[in-house]
Amino acid sequence: MLILVMMVILPISNIKFPEINTLVYGFLGKDITETKILFLGDVMLGRYVETLINKKGSTYPFIGMESLAGRYDQVVGNFEAPLSQDHKQTDVESFNFSISTTSVDSIGTYFSILSLANNHTFDKGEEGLAFTKDILTNKSVKTFGDPNVVDGTSVAVIPHGEQTIALVAINAVTTLDSTSTIELLSDLNTKSDMQIVYVHWGTEYKLEHSQDQEGLARLLIDHGADAIIGHHPHVIQDIDIYKGAPIFYSLGNFVFDQYFDDNVQIGLGVELVLQNSELTYRLVPFTSKDSKSSPRLMTVDERSQLLIDLSSRSSPVIAEKLRESGIIYIIDTLASL
């Protein structure tokens, strides 16, 4: 059962601690195991983004994340293009992407895990995909997922104390092998404590999810997924909940060279905080409207307006929570997921 609650901070004076008869130093109480993960949307460092990087340096697309440095144990994104050994900058009108190795010089500072399960990482074929994996690994970034296959390489495991969270990257823009996906989820349910599907899907530029997305999300949750986090439409889509599992249909662009509309220049981060067995999801909105392809955290006013808009398109179950704070607090235990 899903319960949404307000988060309340009590003054220290209102908290009664048990009497302690022995002299102790520090805090004596229940050990807290905490893991913080930030999920971001599409990251594409080619075309005009490459021009900006060449002018301003490889940190340019990510400098707006500096204030988040050290906050997260893992930062996850979707790497929306292959690196290429025989790289030539992609023309602004082309959709066959290529990324320069110099563009990822600093990416390991900002991301720890990147998905390759999307419709562009195969733009340079098997050779480009293998080269991309090698270079990102050398930059201390773990890759997971494949544009065409769902198997063991689709999984990234994150430890949480003695428990584990399995991230599963899939590409559903092209034909998805649903049988392999369901078999993988079923297997992970016996080996991990929480399963999060990080999925490339949906219709570009649509602010609300499609029936195909909804059908796939429910299928994945029916077979063990505990949360669905989507990307590809280039805009932020609505949020839903099914059987207690949140569905973030699309996080929108994080770094991209699209400037023709406000909606393609804002993106959503999803912060997942696990404290022991309690889960909190918090929305972290970004905008690059005043700094092309270099997102920054939204101001309070910008964030409030986004949450009002997003709540009007999202499930009534969580709409009020979105309007109030952008925090979805789910009382549950990993063992019950």
Image: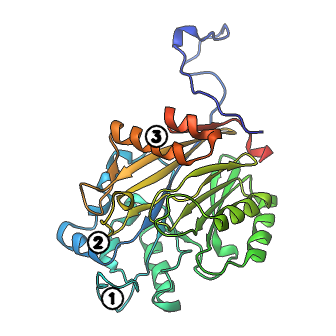
State which quadrant residue 196 falls in.
bottom right
- Point out the tag, 3 or 2, that comes first from the N-terminus: 2
Left/right placement of residue 243 relative to residue 305 reads: right
State which quadrant residue 295 falls in.
bottom left
The N terminus: image quadrant: top right
58 versus 96 height, above or below = above
Q: Secondary structure at mark 3?
A: helix
| Residue 87 numbered tag | 1
Left/right placement of residue 271 relative to residue 222 reads: left
How are the colours assigned in the image? rainbow
Of discs 1 and 2, which sits in the foreground? 2
| Residue 308 numbered tag | 3
Of discs 3 and 2, which sits in the foreground? 3
Pointer 2 residue: 49
| Inter-mark Cα distance, 3 to 1 | 43 Å
| Residue 233 numbered tag | none
Amino acid on which disc 1 is placed: His
Q: Secondary structure at mark 2?
A: helix
| Inter-mark Cα distance, 1 to 2 | 15 Å
